[in-house]
Amino acid sequence: MEERLYNFGMIGLGTMGRNFLLNMADHGFAVAGFDLDASKCTLLESTATKNTIAKGFQELVAMIASLEKPRKIMMLVPAGNPVDQVISNLLPLIETGDIIIDGGNSHYTDTLRRIQSLEAKGIHFMGVGISGGEEGARYGPSIMPGGDEAAWKMVQPLLEAVSAKVNGDPCVAYMGKNAAGHYVKMVHNGIEYAIMQMISEVYDFLKKKVGLDNTEMSNIFQQWDSGEMKSFLLEITADIFQVKDTETSHFLVDMVLDQAGSKGTGKWTSQDAMDLPVSIPSIDVAVAMRDLSDVKEERMQAAKLYPRKGRKISSQKEAMIRDTQNALYFSLVLAYTQGLSMLYKASSVLQMNIPLDDVVKIWRGGCIIRSNFLDIFYTIYKSRKGNISNILLDKAIAKRLKKQVPGTRRFLRTALQAGISTSGISSAINYFDAFTQEKMPVNLIQAQRDYFGAHTYLRNDKSGIYHSEWKPLSTPGIHE
């Protein structure tokens, strides 16, 4: 066995791990992968491009010994205990200065704990978010590394080589201190949840109210994807509507059960937003709707108890489609807005120093939420050096959104009257309406809190903290 032959090692040769290594091998790096499953090791070697170097190992000791120093080892294993188990197995085999990379969807608090533990042992540990799915891993994902900056500089040439490229720029950049890489990926996934929810609501409306069939919807989504809203998720949605089921005469999408799974990153985003705190209602709703989809039997019972007769529109179809487009445009911008506002606040509260201009820059290619909107956001963040707390405060965004608001309201009014659930898009307009009004009605909430709990309040005419006796003594009958 040749020592220090391989530039990079991978633990876990599932589809993502294998494809990432094959991508790296295509860019001239010698790579090694470990998996207990011999067939996965064989598949890595047999699918490698001719004249590239990719070797599969069934023995971890042998793979570690084959890596050049300092060793660069990535894990692509399920989050949680499997990551800790891999680290435990690695520690007796590696030495000071080696780099361990967690490329999975670990919760950032676990990543922070591992960084601190391994730093004391002289081992570099990085939490790295990777987005793009199987195809992205093979041909160019968006990569979000954070944490150990010294380790980042050592792996930077490798990750830049294999990442997606937009106008020649690699879709990878240092995301900040501590567990910033996994934090940015978590929020990325939260935005992804919201966008997918909003697209599903548009699909439901076009099907039930406008009466479009799958072919018509595919055409509509292709049209939208060819314009300002161009994005990966719109592109694949148009594709989905075209696929026929091989077992029936129906379209495949109509045969898919209406229960949406999740791996927890959306839930983590909602939970951590509440801890900061920061408002991300569209992401919260998207998580809630996936949870609601899981109670299929209860929903079937409820549908019988509360029947509704949907009536498809017979006129103004084109106008309704335009309103639907406006609503989707508006709500997609709001989904990004909420996620980016969360990153802005987390950057300071959690002391991660997240560069928002680089975040939107590397999301432009390779990742699941890539879209033309990110080019707009990148221009804004770059000009402001990331110093804008909420994208809605930018004049260029305001000019664009104002055009979409009337159509969004008409869409929601029609959907509400038709009994079609549009919780994601509704949450977007409600967030917008609250954020863009100078005075919210929560002065009443604070008065109620002071009434029953003496929680005090601030005044809008002078400084200080106040408590009042709110019960009107002259009003008979109250609380008797």
Image: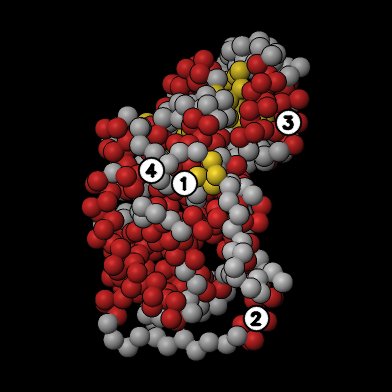
Which tag is nearer the camera, tag 2 or tag 4? Answer: 4
Q: Quadrant of residue 44?
A: top right
Q: Is residue 42 left or right of residue 376?
A: right
* Badge 3 or badge 4: first in the primary sequence: 3
Residue bearing mark 2: 302
* Badge 4 or badge 1: first in the primary sequence: 4
Q: Residue at x 42, y 47 (%)?
A: 460
Mark 4 and mark 3 in contact (Cβ < 8 Å)?
no
Residue bearing mark 3: 84
Residue bearing mark 4: 390
* Badge 3 or badge 2: first in the primary sequence: 3
Which tag is nearer the camera, tag 3 or tag 4? Answer: 4
Residue bearing mark 1: 459
Q: Residues within 10 Å of mark 4 (few under 14, many from 20)?
A: some
Q: Residue at x 58, y 51 (%)?
A: 468
The CA span between labels 3 and 4 is 36 Å
Seen from the viewer's position, the closer of residues 364 and 477 is 477
Q: Is residue 244 visible?
A: no
In the image, residue 406 sits, relative to residue 268, either above or below, namely below
